Amino acid sequence: PRLRLRLRLRLRLRLRLRLRWC
């Protein structure tokens, strides 16, 4: 379960970075 949380956090960070890049 910890790995899943980490993956989710990474995905959220990536989405935020993408929005900023836009």
Image (tube, grey):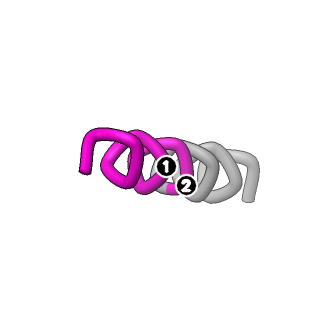
Question: At numbered mark 1, what does the secondary structure look like: helix, strand or loop?
Answer: helix
Confirm or deny contact between disc 2 and disc 1 (CB under 8 A).
yes
Q: Nearer the viewer, mark 2 or mark 1?
A: 1
Quarter of the image where the N terminus is located: bottom right
Magenta stretch, main secondary structure, is helix
Residue linked to disc 1: 16
The residue drawn where x is 52% and y is 43% is 13
Of 8 and 12, nearer the camera is 12
Residue linked to disc 2: 12
Q: Is residue 19 magenta?
A: yes
Q: Rounded to the nearest whole Å, what is the CA distance between mark 2 and mark 1?
A: 6 Å
Q: What is the three-letter code of the residue carrying label 1?
A: Arg
Above or below 16: residue 1: below
The answer to which image quadrant residue 14 occupies is: top left
Q: Where's residue 15, x and y in %? A: 42, 56
* Residue 10 appears left or right of 17: right
Label 2 packing within 10 angstroms: few (<14), some (14-19), many (20+): few
Of 16 and 9, nearer the camera is 16
Magenta-colored span: 12-22
The residue drawn where x is 38% and y is 54% is 19
The answer to which image quadrant residue 4 occupies is: bottom right
The residue drawn where x is 31% and y is 49% is 18
Q: What is the three-letter code of the residue carrying label 2?
A: Arg
Above or below 17: residue 19: below
Q: Where's residue 22, x and y in %? A: 25, 51
Question: At numbered mark 2, what does the secondary structure look like: helix, strand or loop?
Answer: helix
Of 12 and 18, nearer the camera is 18
Q: Is residue 16 magenta?
A: yes
The residue drawn where x is 27% and y is 40% is 21
* Residue 17 appears left or right of 16: left
